[in-house]
Amino acid sequence: MDFTAIIVAGLVVGCVGIILGLFLGIAGEKFKVEVDEREEAICGVLPGNNCGGCGYAGCSGLAAAIVNGEAPVNQCPVGGAPVAAQIGEIMGVAAEEGAKQVAFVKCAGTCEKAKTDYDYSGLQDCTAMSFVPAGGPKSCNYGCLGYGTCVKACPFDAIHVIDGIAVVDKEACKACGKCVAACPKHLIELVPYDAAHLVKCSSQDKGKDVMNACSVGCIGCHLCEKNCPSDAIHVVDNIAHIDQDKCTGCGICAEKCPKKCIM
């Protein structure tokens, strides 16, 4: 065995390792990206859900945007006011308190109240309904399909299908908007947490067609609109819409609605 060759080989490998180590160390120092300490501090404050509800690709993306002045300190819908206050302290600014929001499903067509045209036993996914006859078995083409695409999208277990329609748990909802984006019927929207009255229907069909499909659908009768003392509700495209900024919560619209679709 040639021990000299082994020693030489070991020395060569050792020298190469030292040279590479020095090169990588110098390159790392030369090309390193400076990270603002505030960005790291904000990441430590954010919930870490990386849900994307803020409009950025994860919490680190939001932290960078806040430090760069591209996003307000209260941009995180999950953390809410407490997290906004902590981020405000890090950034040295006051955190404006925004109105708490919650997801709302604009449909009350449960299994008993909504009619169906046929029995369906295929893939249990709302997005798959675009490939089946009439866009799904429900007679109302605007109603909740009840196959839980929104449930799968929610990272906070805040929405579940109950009696054929999606129902939001207001206390668990973080208003991240995942369910809003996932619903192929565009039935879910973010509304003020303390909204006094909301219309649980989205059908734009005429009254007769609505009644043939669902017993609690808005028929566009305008009674809510005519009786609202604050001009907060109007019927557009055969469906009532409530302006939450004008609504005083008097309840007259809900009282006058013949189909009781205003909750």
Image (cartoon, rainbow, N blue to C red):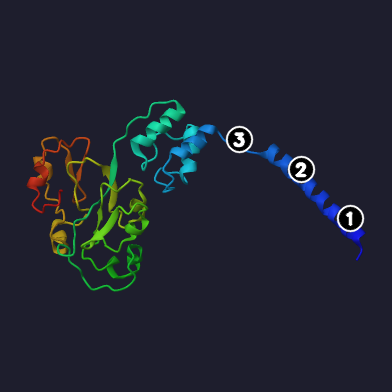
The numbered dot on residue 8 is 1
> Identity of the amino acid at label 2?
Leu
On the image, the x and y values in percent for residue 102 come to 28, 45
Rendered view: 138 above or below 40: below
Residue 44 left/right relative to 138 = right
On the image, the x and y values in percent for residue 246 come to 19, 35
The numbered dot on residue 49 is none
On the image, the x and y values in percent for residue 12 come to 85, 53
Separation of marks 1 and 2 at Cα, in angstroms: 21 Å
> Identity of the amino acid at label 3?
Glu
Residue at 42% over, 47% down: 49
Residue at 73% over, 39% down: 26
User: The N terminus is located in which quarter?
Assistant: bottom right
Circles 1, 3 touching at the beta carbon (< 8 Å): no
Residue at 45% over, 30% down: 90
Q: Nearer the viewer, residue 223 or 73?
A: 73
Separation of marks 1 and 3 at Cα, in angstroms: 41 Å
